[in-house]
Image: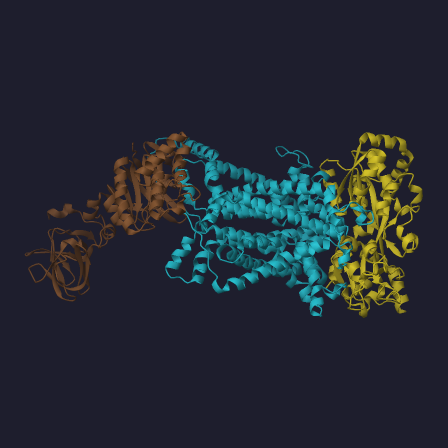
Chain colours: A yellow, B cyan, C brown
């Protein structure tokens, strides 16, 4: 990272701390609720269509109508920024996986403000409220076929994926698609850990190829040159890895959104068709976690209803998203999977967390690097 | 060259001359209309194109990530230099460009041949059941491209992506070779299947309008059948052929879903999928450069097409003033063999994918093919929190019902307006082949073809957010959605309009003109009635397109203007396959009904007359 | 019906590099039946379309019935519908989606005539043309001749003072064409409308016109009444174009000696009534002025019979002598064998002389010599 960016980060961090503090100091929920009822409506750009499930109960509880737009995170960014530039302030709340753009573009431009309800703040870690409120953590991680590997996971390190026996046997989403790009960028951000993992796996220090700067890049190079297959969606990858009837063994390792296991493995053997299971014990990590956040528009037409909705979405209104593979940011709401499927809680799970600054700033370099090693 | 006696002062003569010329121009509704259309298109097409181009020639926000010197708003060639000549230019541009050209050209050519042949069989031969065949053969275009690609994947599933064996492997016991599962060959085949109906619809329209007296007279002179085809029939449908080719090429090089699903797994990227990948990483400037390359590529084809067609448009006027007859060719002993071939094709290309979709929409848990797993829940079930996050069945979901109504409203009004605008532009282009105004209109109307959908919608959002002079604020309105879809479909509608007009002999209009019919009157009494069958085919293509349009409008949709495809898209993203499949089926069904209605309403007197004459 | 004169001044129409009509001046008097005659591509149809207003000339002026409808100087251009002209197209240009009645009534509806009047007028025109009962037919349900009549009826219905016709008979079979010629002539007589008629068929032109304009390469070659045109073609082009079979052209040198005036043609000479001044000329003589004699007589030249072409009341005989071929019209009763010798005699007064270089008719004013 360049020096200028450090100052920017510090400035933003300082500002946002100030904002959170100011906001926290002023949260009089009685007044907010009354004002929200007065506003009567709240507009949200939602990454998830499950928003529809809480419209009625929110109306019933607060008398406020939720007008929700079903928009992918990228589309929210595009729409919101165009609207702001044209002087149209139509939306109150942004809800999606667009932290990099929000932190690096909208926050400095003053288009959004962070908002963390004071009632929730005590249950959140620092990186879950700074600068934006995290509703839940999702993850992209590696899965294997538990039914076809009765003796347990066939691999124990990310470095195994660079071995010849796994050539063409790993399925991953397009490395140049938004979320998977962030996954590999996050791995590339951890060269020391990758070097240490190499030593643990092969018992010797790593030798870097020509033009490669560190162990993480070396891993990415070897992994990509090992011919992983691109799957066109995370569902298909989860199905492809988890299908118990496949005959071309060993069954492939898949890189998918963990929540897909809800349909393709978490219920095995009750559901006997799919047995995709997470590779929890992979060294150094088995995947990357990213945040789904809630942010308030700086010029929200219904600011109080917006605040009320944000609070609701991390409290009583969280239920549609408390699903396998997703972890609520609030530590007091236990993730469903921990309870039902005996999976590790978020604090213990081996995931690296994406760094929005890093992901945003290295995007061009990442594409260059990937394309220079891609087949 | 002295012309007539001149008593006037030269200056006053000049003034009078210009005044007369101006008055004449201003009194000509055709000229005024051309001017208005040109102005409107300039705003609707050139402004977005300029924005797009300027973004690739200047530093934008966030470009400090590329260069320390980036200063937003400043001119630079760095983006083009980086993409065209940089370290990864081969991966980013040149390889995708080659792939695009290979798949695009071959698929367009094959789709043209297939569509043309089927059109001839259905309109001009005694093929059994050609009336219903006509509808069935347009189905593959109504099925969304990604559904077709997924059907291919299901059938020719390769073990490299894991999962259960595909139908091919189940039938033959061996895995299909990779080149049959993924890469250029399946891309080309599915594209041909998806896009041939384009050519089919346009060429059947043209074939149906040929006066077979022309063919008969050649027959009387002893010309053999194939010679008549080559010398008479084929040249007369040339404009329809050329329009189809241009449209097909635009679609095949610009197509996204098919190359993404069938090329991605083996890293066979095309310009459009590469463009999508860059957008997906929010590197829009890279995407814009690729978009401009795509636009330039098809502009070349359009230019070539106008070179070929422009000079000799009169040759193609096939509705002459002598009345006409349509005859059909007897296939004789080939009748039934050809029928079974065509029917099998229709079954595989149209009925099978729909059947697959329908079956998948009835599975309680997707992937379980047992009978016990069949359910109508996703169609008519009440909300059940245990299934699909409590989404009710399609026909009980208010989102879907509202969306269906919006979709219909949107597609009907859009295709109607598009047909009229397309006819007007087509008229101007065809009837004034030498005028700069019509040349300009022709070129501009083709540009929106390859604008990346999302970016296009985003620009419209900015352009119509607030009132700018005479341009009203359309933010959040239904009108804006129709407008953006209209402009995006302009290339089709203009071309179908042009080929419809090109078929009408100019002397038919001149005869009316001599009797004192004004331009509008001619349009109403002569051109529109005679162009109806052409306009209707164009309208049907647009209707189908509008029912499915997604990317350009996704940013402009509001909850109250939601259309079916936006809902289906979200279901697919949420991995509720049954609901999204059911929805696609619903869209297909509504589209079919709509097509039938348009067909019935708009067949026009001429085609009814002709049918009576068969 | 009133009729309007049409005046063309310096009319020029270019299509790119090609000049279709080249600085053309022409005065069409009211009520005449003027035929524009010429081979295809001579500019006759373009000229007609310029008069109609379907083409805009590049230069010149057009005046119809006293109104300037086009002037390049003044940038005047009156659109076709307001020029008091109507046209019958070669292809008839019937609107295929309209019935006979609708086709004919179209122009009347545009004139906002009352419905009853329209019905009456259409009925009248159809009766005049012997087309009763075909009102409800569509063009494709009509024969070629009927379609032609509908096209005529459409023109007659609106009673324009100037009729324009672009090869209206060329799509009919030979018999129908003959019938229609007399009908059109009658029609012109009855309506009194100024008629401008385009054809490439010289017989059609000569039989129907009151005046014929022969055109070639955008230029007027000659304007004359049919008999004059036939008798005194202004140049070799017209001479060759008019008349069937073609005129005989003999390259000749005028010789005057004590025996009289002669035309020296290759190895023979023919007596002439007068001689032009030029050294080298082309003498033109119609087949009917060439007599065939069974035996040698003074002034006659021996030829061989090459072919005999009977044509009903007359016979055209092709005769040769060396490089010279002549066509003679003869009595069908004459019994001729192929290759037999025959003597031809040409009326010394019947020649037209043309300059060998200029191709122009050499003036009879020189006749006194």
- In the image, farthest residue toward the front: B372
How many numbered circles are shown? 0
Horizontal placement of A354 versus B100: left or right?
A: right
Q: Is residue B549 visible?
A: yes
Q: Quadrant of residue A279?
A: bottom right
Q: Nearer the viewer, residue B470 or A118?
A: A118
Q: Quadrant of residue C328?
A: bottom left
Q: Quadrant of the N terminus of chain C?
A: top left
Horizontal placement of B441 versus C356: left or right?
A: right
Q: Nearer the viewer, residue B353 or B449?
A: B353
Residue shown at 65% from the left, 48% from the top: B589
- Provide residue A6's location: percent of width, then percent of height: 85, 48
Q: Nearer the viewer, residue C156 or A373?
A: C156
Horizontal placement of B521 versus C85: left or right?
A: right
Q: Nearer the viewer, residue C39 or C205?
A: C205
Horizontal placement of B303 versus A373: left or right?
A: left
Q: Is residue B82 above or below residue C54?
A: below
- Provide residue B304's location: percent of width, then percent of height: 52, 54
- Provide residue B411's location: percent of width, then percent of height: 62, 43
- Provide residue B548's location: percent of width, then percent of height: 65, 48
Q: Is residue A131 visible?
A: no
């Amino acid at each position: 990272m360049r020096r200028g960016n450090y100052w920017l980060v510090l400035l933003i961090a300082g500002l946002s701390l100030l904002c959170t503090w100011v906001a926290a100091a002023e949260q009089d929920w009685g007044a907010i609720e009354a004002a929200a009822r007065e506003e009567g409506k709240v507009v949200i750009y939602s990454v998830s269509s499950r928003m529809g499930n809480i419209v009625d109960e929110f109306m019933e509880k607060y008398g406020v109508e939720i007008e929700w737009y079903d928009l992918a995170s990228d589309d929210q960014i595009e729409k919101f920024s165009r609207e702001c530039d044209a002087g149209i302030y139509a939306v109150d709340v942004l809800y999606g996986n667009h932290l990099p753009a929000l932190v690096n573009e909208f926050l400095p431009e003053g288009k959004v403000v962070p908002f963390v309800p004071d009632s929730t703040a005590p249950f959140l870690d620092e990186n879950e409220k700074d600068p934006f409120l995290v509703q839940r953590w999702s993850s992209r991680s590696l899965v294997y076929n538990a039914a076809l590997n009765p003796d347990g996971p066939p691999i124990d390190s990310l470095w195994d994926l660079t071995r010849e026996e796994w050539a063409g046997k790993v399925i991953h989403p397009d490395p140049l698609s938004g979320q998977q790009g962030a996954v590999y960028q996050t791995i590339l951000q951890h060269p020391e850990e990758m070097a240490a993992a190499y030593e643990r796996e092969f018992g010797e220090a790593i030798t870097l190829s020509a033009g490669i700067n560190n162990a993480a890049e070396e891993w990415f190079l070897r992994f990509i040159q090992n011919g992983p297959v691109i799957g066109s969606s995370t569902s298909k990858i989860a199905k492809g890895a988890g299908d118990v009837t496949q005959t071309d063994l060993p069954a492939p390792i898949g890189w998918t959104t963990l929540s897909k296991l809800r349909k393709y493995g978490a219920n095995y053997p009750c559901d006997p068709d799919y047995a995709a299971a997470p590779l929890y014990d992979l060294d150094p990590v088995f995947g990357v976690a990213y945040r789904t956040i809630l942010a308030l528009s700086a010029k929200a037409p219904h600011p109080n209803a917006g605040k009320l909705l944000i609070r609701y979405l991390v409290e009583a209104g969280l239920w549609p998203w408390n699903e396998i593979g997703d972890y609520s940011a609030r530590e007091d709401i236990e993730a469903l999977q921990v309870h039902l499927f005996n999976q590790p809680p978020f604090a213990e799970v081996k995931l690296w967390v994406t760094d929005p600054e890093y992901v945003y700033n290295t995007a061009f370099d990442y594409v260059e690097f990937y394309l220079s090693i891609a087949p | 060259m002295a012309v007539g006696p001149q008593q006037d002062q030269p200056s006053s003569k000049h003034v009078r001359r210009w005044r007369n010329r101006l008055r004449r121009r201003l009194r000509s509704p055709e000229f005024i209309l051309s001017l208005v259309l040109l102005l409107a298109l300039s705003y609707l097409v050139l402004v977005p194109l300029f924005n797009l181009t300027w973004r690739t020639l200047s530093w934008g926000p966030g470009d400090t990530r590329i260069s320390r010197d980036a200063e937003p708003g400043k001119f630079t060639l760095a983006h083009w230099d980086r993409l065209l000549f940089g370290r990864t230019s081969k991966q980013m541009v040149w390889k995708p460009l080659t792939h695009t050209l290979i798949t695009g050209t071959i698929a367009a050519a094959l789709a043209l041949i297939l569509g043309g042949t089927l059109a001839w069989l259905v309109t001009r031969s005694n093929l059994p059941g050609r009336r219903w065949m006509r509808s069935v053969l347009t189905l593959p275009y109504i099925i969304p491209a990604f559904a077709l690609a997924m059907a291919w994947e299901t059938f020719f599933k390769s073990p490299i992506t894991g999962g259960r064996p595909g139908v091919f492997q189940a039938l033959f016991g061996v895995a299909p070779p990779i080149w049959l599962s993924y890469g250029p060959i399946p891309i080309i085949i599915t594209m041909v299947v998806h896009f041939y109906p384009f050519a089919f619809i346009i060429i059947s329209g043209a074939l149906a309008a040929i006066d077979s007296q022309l063919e008969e007279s050649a027959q009387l002179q002893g010309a053999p059948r194939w010679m008549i085809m080559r010398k008479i029939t084929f040249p007369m449908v040339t404009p329809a052929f050329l329009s189809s080719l241009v449209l097909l090429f635009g679609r095949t090089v610009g197509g996204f879903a098919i190359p993404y699903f069938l090329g991605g797994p083996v890293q066979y990227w095309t310009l459009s999928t590469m463009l999508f990948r860059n957008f997906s990483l929010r590197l829009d400037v890279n995407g814009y450069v690729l978009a401009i390359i795509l636009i330039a590529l098809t502009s070349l084809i359009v230019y070539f097409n106008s070179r070929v067609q422009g000079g000799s448009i009169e040759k193609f006027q096939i509705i002459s003033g002598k009345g006409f007859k349509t005859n059909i060719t007897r296939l004789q002993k080939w009748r039934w063999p050809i029928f079974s071939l065509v029917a099998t094709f229709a079954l595989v290309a149209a009925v099978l994918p729909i059947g697959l979709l329908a079956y998948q929409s009835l599975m309680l848990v997707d992937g379980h093919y047992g009978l016990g797993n069949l359910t109508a829940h996703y169609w008519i079930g009440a909300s059940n929190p245990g299934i699909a996050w409590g989404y009710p069945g399609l026909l009980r979901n208010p989102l879907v019902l509202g969306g269906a109504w919006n979709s219909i409203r949107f597609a009907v009004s859009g295709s109607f307006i598009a047909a009229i605008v397309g006819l007007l532009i087509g008229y101007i282009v065809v009837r004034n082949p030498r005028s700069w105004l019509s040349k300009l209109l022709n070129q501009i109307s083709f540009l929106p073809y390859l604008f990346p959908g999302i970016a296009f919608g985003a620009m419209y959002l900015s352009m119509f957010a607030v009132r700018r002079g005479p341009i009203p604020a359309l933010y959040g309105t239904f009108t804006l959605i129709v407008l953006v879809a209209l402009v995006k479909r302009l290339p089709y509608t203009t071309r179908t309009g042009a080929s419809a007009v090109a078929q009408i002999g100019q002397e038919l209009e001149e005869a009316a003109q001599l009797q004192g019919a004004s331009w509008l009157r001619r349009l109403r009494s002569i051109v529109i009635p005679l162009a109806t069958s052409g306009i209707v085919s164009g309208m049907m293509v647009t209707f189908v397109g509008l029912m499915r349009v997604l990317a350009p409008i996704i940013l402009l949709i509001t909850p109250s203007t939601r259309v079916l495809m936006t809902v289906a898209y979200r279901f697919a993203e949420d991995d509720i396959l049954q609901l999204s499949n059911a929805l696609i089926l619903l869209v297909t069904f509504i589209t079919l009904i709509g097509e039938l209605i348009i067909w019935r309403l708009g067949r026009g007197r001429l085609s009814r007359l002709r049918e009576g004459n068969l | 019906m009133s009729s309007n004169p049409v005046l063309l001044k310096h009319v020029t129409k270019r299509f790119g590099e090609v000049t279709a009509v080249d600085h053309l001046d022409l005065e069409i008097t009211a009520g005449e039946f003027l035929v524009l005659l010429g081979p295809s591509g001579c500019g006759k149809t373009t000229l007609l379309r310029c008069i109609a207003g379907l083409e805009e000339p590049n230069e010149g002026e057009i005046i119809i019935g006293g109104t300037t409808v086009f002037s390049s100087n003044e940038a005047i251009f009156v659109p076709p519908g307001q020029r008091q002209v109507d046209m019958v197209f070669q292809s008839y240009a019937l609107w295929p989606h309209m019935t006979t009645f609708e086709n004919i009534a179209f122009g009347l509806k545009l004139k906002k005539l009352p419905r009853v009047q329209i019905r009456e007028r259409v009925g009248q025109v159809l009766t005049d043309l012997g087309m009763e009962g075909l009102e409800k037919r569509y063009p494709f349900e009509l024969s070629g001749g009927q379609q032609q009549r509908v096209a005529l009826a459409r023109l007659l219905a609106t009673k324009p003072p100037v009729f324009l016709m672009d090869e209206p008979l060329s799509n009919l079979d030979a018999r129908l064409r003959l019938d229609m010629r007399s009908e059109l002539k009658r029609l012109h007589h009855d309506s009194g409308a100024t008629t401008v008629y385009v054809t490439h068929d010289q017989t059609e032109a000569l039989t129907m016109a009151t005046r014929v304009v022969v055109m070639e390469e955008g230029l007027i070659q000659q304007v004359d009444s049919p008999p004059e045109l036939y008798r005194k073609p202004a140049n070799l082009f017209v001479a060759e174009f008019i008349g069937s079979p073609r005129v005989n052209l003999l390259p000749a040198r005028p010789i005057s000696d004590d025996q009289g005036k002669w035309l020296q043609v290759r190895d023979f000479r023919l007596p002439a009534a007068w001689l032009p001044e030029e050294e080298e000329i082309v003498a033109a003589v119609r087949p009917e002025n060439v007599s065939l004699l069974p035996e040698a007589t003074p002034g006659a030249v021996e030829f061989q019979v090459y072919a005999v072409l009977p044509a009903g009341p007359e016979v055209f005989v092709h005769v040769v002598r060396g490089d010279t071929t002549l066509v003679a019209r003869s009595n069908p009763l004459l019994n001729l064998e192929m290759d037999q010798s025959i003597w031809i005699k040409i009326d010394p007064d019947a020649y037209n002389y043309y300059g060998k270089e200029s191709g122009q008719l050499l003036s009879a004013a020189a006749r006194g010599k």
